[in-house]
Amino acid sequence: MMGEWKLTQSYDFGGRSVRYGRSGDGPPMVLVHGTPWSSFNLRHLIRRLSRDYTVYFFDLLGYGQSSKEKGDVSLGVQNEVLNGLLDHWALDEPIIVGHDFGGATALRTHLLNGRRFRKIILIDPVAVSPWGSPFFQHVNAHEAAFTGLPDYIHDAVVRTYVETAAFKPLDAATLDGIVAPWTGDAGKAAFYRQMAQADSRFTDEAQAFYHTITTPTLILWGREDSWIPLERGQELNEMIPGSVLRVIDDAGHLVIEEKPEELLAEILDFIQA
């Protein structure tokens, strides 16, 4: 299935390629994936939302089909990538949807780059400190050792790690699609690079301004999220004035794969209200 998922257009960010796509017709909407995901994982949302909206989607720098060469792929650069893409697409005030790191990227772009959005939708976002699993911290301390793993061990590490994001087992095609960008020497290095560069100071920078958000904001959370517990979503809901929190049952952190129809119902209700 990943072989069918191709981002056909490219944006140059400081000499590095950011791959993107566009689908549908209507008011503009931008979808931003998280880690260790790619726009592939947003495909269910893209297909439905593009019936009513012009949906813009891309792979974060260092992820998916975008450039995986050495360099900054932290949250500290991803909002600059999004900010540049919004100019490239000539979008003034789109709806923004962000999952995981994509939620943090959307919030940083709004609060630190001053980009206006018509509505903000956050799905299990990395937004409230502390965050970062023990595995992240271990990779942070031993990045070179992980990059040197034999391919078959690396593949097992990625698959096992990814599976912990879902409440119920993922089907083989979905799992293959998630793992595919992280294979080969460049993919392997990129997988550990983005973990090694994870730092909660990037969310702290934005968190200080959550109380200033006046844009209508919807927070969606998988009730069984073991990566970022629901309590973080409840805290975020209290930090953003007037925000709405909706919980999706029987779904984990990868709710975008597990319960896309329920997510879509909540998203469409919110943006069409």
Image (tube, rainbow, N blue to C red):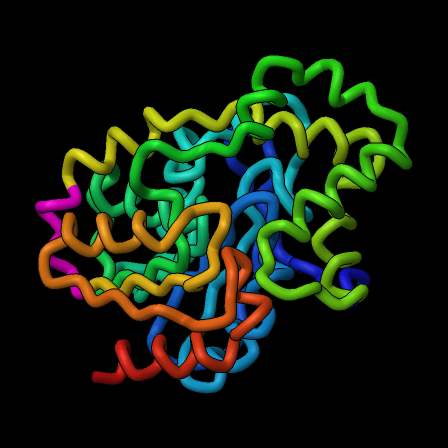
Identify the image quadrant of the N terminus.
Answer: bottom right
Task: Report the front residue among 148 and 62.
Answer: 148
Task: Report the front residue among 84 and 187.
Answer: 187
The picture places residue 239, in percent across and down from the top left corner, at: 15, 48
**Residue 4 left/right relative to 93:** right
Q: Is residue 174 above or below residue 10?
A: below
The picture places residue 5, in percent across and down from the top left corner, at: 72, 64
Q: How many marks?
A: 0
Q: Is residue 98 above or below residue 209?
A: below
**Residue 202 left/right relative to 78:** left
Task: Report the front residue among 49 and 123.
Answer: 123
Q: In this view, does 259 lie above or below 86?
A: below
Task: Report the front residue among 70 and 101.
Answer: 101
Measuring 44% from the left and 37% from the top, which residue is drawn there?
78
Residue 172 in magenta?
no
Measuring 48% from the left and 28% from the top, which residue is drawn there?
198
Q: What stretch is highlighted in magenta?
A: 210-216
The picture places residue 206, in percent across and down from the top left corner, at: 24, 36
Measuring 44% from the left and 72% from the top, which residue is drawn there?
249
Measuring 17% from the left and 65% from the top, which residue is drawn there?
216
Residue 223: name its quadrant: bottom left
**Residue 116 left/right relative to 35:** left
The picture places residue 114, in percent across and down from the top left corner, at: 20, 43
Identify the image quadrant of the C terminus.
Answer: bottom left
**Residue 81 left/right relative to 267:** right
Residue 234: name its quadrant: bottom left
